[in-house]
Amino acid sequence: MVLQEDINLLKEKIEQADSIVVGGASGMSAASGFIFYYQEDDVFKSLAGSLAKKYNRHNMFDLFYDQRPSRGEQWALMLRTIKYVYECQTGETYIDLAKLLNGKNYYIATTNQDAQFYRVFPEERITRIQGDWRYWQCSRPCHDKIYYNKEETFKLYEKIENDALPDNLIPRCPHCGAELAPWVRSYTFLQGEFYRQEMKRYMEFLRSNAHRNTLFLELE
Ligand SMILES: [Zn+2]
């Protein structure tokens, strides 16, 4: 339980701070009800379809990391998850945080890949350390580019049959022909120009506020 005096203290610290650095992690989304990554809820059941039972898995991360689903099945899971990321409601925790930080000098560094911060905060104040489901990269990766995937995701989503995307429709790299992959943390996660620019922006915020009264707000 959160004590009222803790809430008051936090409000006071936010008021007094010259700058605020927010570290946003999975709890921000879980507290808003986005728990299908880790738990067997209705969202998970609808995204997983028959694959949950077929592979006896009870949350999305377990299914993602399972080696048994076919490529087409894995793509069906990814496409449904990405579509959900685009379409789901904005979490209350994010709306509340935006109210708290309104008018403040703040910056957000997040490990969340679900793009919820982008619903309520300007892009230039966010650095995504673990990527973002709304982009694809070459799975190798053979070149330094990420691709915004909204249109393609919705198009391919319609082509899913029996909980699998047909193999010939799996999105491929325009340069080398390898499969594309979500731009999220993995062994082949692309930390290229785009990533470096965002990290640089974050570092610049830290540097420019180094001698000011900075509040580090860890929301895990
Ligand atoms: Zn490639």
Image (cartoon, rainbow, N blue to C red):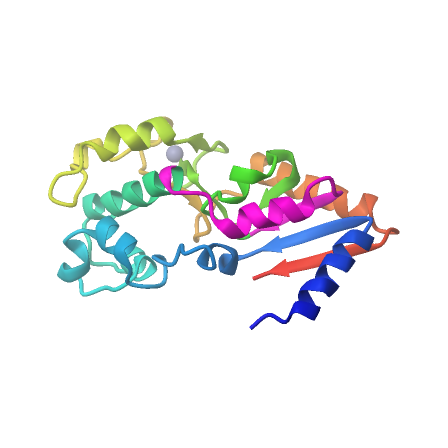
Write down which quadrant ligand 1 falls in: top left
Q: Nearer the viewer, residue 15 or 49?
A: 15
Residue 152 drawn at (x, y percent): 32, 28
Q: What residue span does the magenta drawing correspond to?
A: 87-110
Q: Does the image show residue 112?
A: no
Residue 73 drawn at (x, y percent): 20, 47
Quarter of the image containing the N terminus?
bottom right
Magenta segment: does it hold 103? yes
- Residue 39 location, quadrant: bottom left
Q: Residue at x 76, y 43 (%)?
A: 105
Horizontal arrangement in the rendering, residue 154 relative to residue 2 (left or right): left
In the depicted structure, whether residue 109 falls above or below residue 61: above
Q: Residue at x 70, y 51 (%)?
A: 21
In the depicted structure, whether residue 208 falls above or below residue 2: above
In the depicted structure, whether residue 151 falls above or below residue 18: above
Residue 137 drawn at (x, y percent): 42, 37
Q: Does the image show residue 26?
A: yes
- Residue 68 location, quadrant: bottom left
Residue 121 drawn at (x, y percent): 60, 39
Quarter of the image containing the C terminus?
bottom right
Horizontal arrangement in the rendering, residue 150 relative to residue 189 (left or right): left
Magenta segment: does it hold 109? yes
**Total numbered labels placed on residues in the image:** 0
